[in-house]
Image (spheres, rainbow, N blue to C red):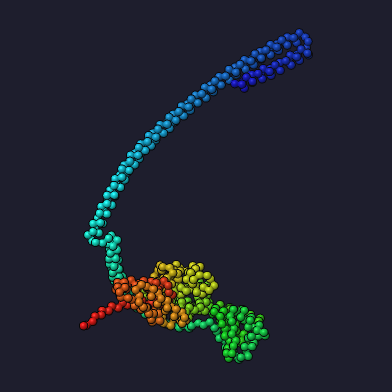
Amino acid sequence: MAIYVIVAIVAVVITLLIAVPVTANISVKKKTEKDAETIGTAEVKARSIIDEALKTAETKKREALLEAKEENLRTKNELEKETKERRAELQKYEKRVLSREEAVDKKADALEKREADYTAKETELKKKEKKVDELHDQRVQELERISGLTSEQAKDYLLKTVEDEVKIDTAKLYKELESKAKEEADKKAKEYVVTAIQKCAADHVSEATISVVQLPSDEMKGRIIGREGRNIRTLETLTGVDLIIDDTPEAVVLSGFDPIRREVARIALEKLIVDGRIHPARIEEMVEKAQKEVETMMREEGESAALEVGVHGIHPELIRLLGRMKFRSSYGQNALKHSIEVAQLAGLLAGEVGTDIRMAKRAGLLHDIGKSIDHEVEGSHIQIGADLCRKYKESQVVINAVESHHGDTEPTSLVACIVQAADAISAARPGARRETLETYTNRLKQLEDITNSFKGVDKSFAIQAGREIRVMVVPEHVTDSDMVLLARSISKQIEAELEYPGQIKVNVIRESRVVDYAK
């Protein structure tokens, strides 16, 4: 509305500004009567223009007022409509809140009623429990009066009776299960083992910690020592092996616990003796050649072992590590020969039981692969071997056989069980391994100490080179049923605390004597 009023005023002002100059120009230029008439006409026109402008402004003003009133009316109607809608929504929310409050009140009343019921029931239960306790006490008193024993005495008697019955039943059940399992398994197991041992014959040479190199003459000893001992120091430094040059005629002794280093030193020294030129530079050259020769030898030995067993597709690095086991021994048994023997035994056993022969041979050949680097890497040879098999993509069956061949993990396949049995056969057969006298006597003493620690044992004797333990029990303390459980307990403790090749027979003996006198 204000805009329209301003427009009308501006139009009137513009009209006046146009009309006044025109009138002034006319009066100045022409002073004649004709000019006077023209001026009068212009004034009339100017007035008419001003009137029209005023009328137009008034019209615009009215229109603006009407539009403003209509806008106010429309806004008022919209506000009233929105207010009505809000009121309706508020009423709806108010009804909903009221209904929820009513529902909450009903639930609260129900909970109060239920709580009161629970309280009443709890009171009633307490009364019944009290009455039951009174009846129980009366019954116990009556039983004690009738039996002449207190409740503690009766309980001890009952427990002892049940314990004796359970012991007898357990011993009987154990005997039945053991005899049944032996009947079914002994015949086939012995047949399989005997067949496998008969088909497998292998030569074993005990490894020592020294090697002897023969010399063409005793004069060579001085050349090996060199001026101020430089030659012998160089050779010992490069190989890590001690050279012992003593009064032994025409011989030099190489001493070292690492068989590979000892072999490198032996080959290098023999080459130097043949060559005749012995000085530090030549020694270094010959040691390097000997190391390459030993590496080649290890690879060839690994390939030969795989070929002998009939296993193909093994990773070249595993082949090299297999050859390295030629220079490793355990209890005097060569590790590579042992692995070959286990592979052959596993293959024979697999053929007898009808499982995969190739997989059994592969697992048997690789079961001790961790021993090739167990002095260089932390961990047991079992864990190292399993990691190596995983690294070079061996199958899960082979990995599990490596992990479980000493019982560290549970075998998940028949092949793993066969490898475990073949390893035990190879290690336990007569002549396979040797022990020092001190280790042997300590094992026998520990065996007797374990059996003597059990209650009821009178004496124990380790016989047959520690393959059997005879346990004499006190007959008054150990019954026939207790003997079965005692033998089982002793076996379990021996398995847990001792390391031994093969198996140990636990023989529990109970002697009953009846003495009478004729008068």
The residue positioned 38% from the left and 81% from the top of the image is: 463
Q: Is residue 77 visible?
A: yes
The residue positioned 27% from the left and 67% from the top of the image is: 165
Is residue 314 positioned above or below 434 on the image?
Answer: above
Quadrant location of the C terminus in the rendered image: bottom left
Is residue 35 positioned above or below 419 on the image?
Answer: above
Q: Is residue 391 left or right of residue 20?
A: left
The residue positioned 37% from the left and 38% from the top of the image is: 108
Q: Which residue reaches farthest top?
A: 33
Is residue 183 positioned above or below 130 on the image?
Answer: below
Residue 207 percent location from the top left of the image: 50, 82
Q: Which residue reaches farthest left?
A: 519
Q: Is residue 43 left or right of residue 438?
A: right
In-front residue for pair 239/360:
239
Quadrant location of the N terminus in the rendered image: top right
The residue positioned 30% from the left and 74% from the top of the image is: 476
In-front residue for pair 151/464:
151
Residue 314 percent location from the top left of the image: 49, 72
Q: Is residue 293 visible?
A: no
In-front residue for pair 461/244:
461
Residue 451 percent location from the top left of the image: 38, 75
Q: Quadrant of residue 453?
A: bottom left
Residue 129 percent location from the top left of the image: 29, 49
Q: Quadrant of residue 106?
A: top left
In-front residue for pair 486/56:
486
Total number of numbered discs in the rendering: 0
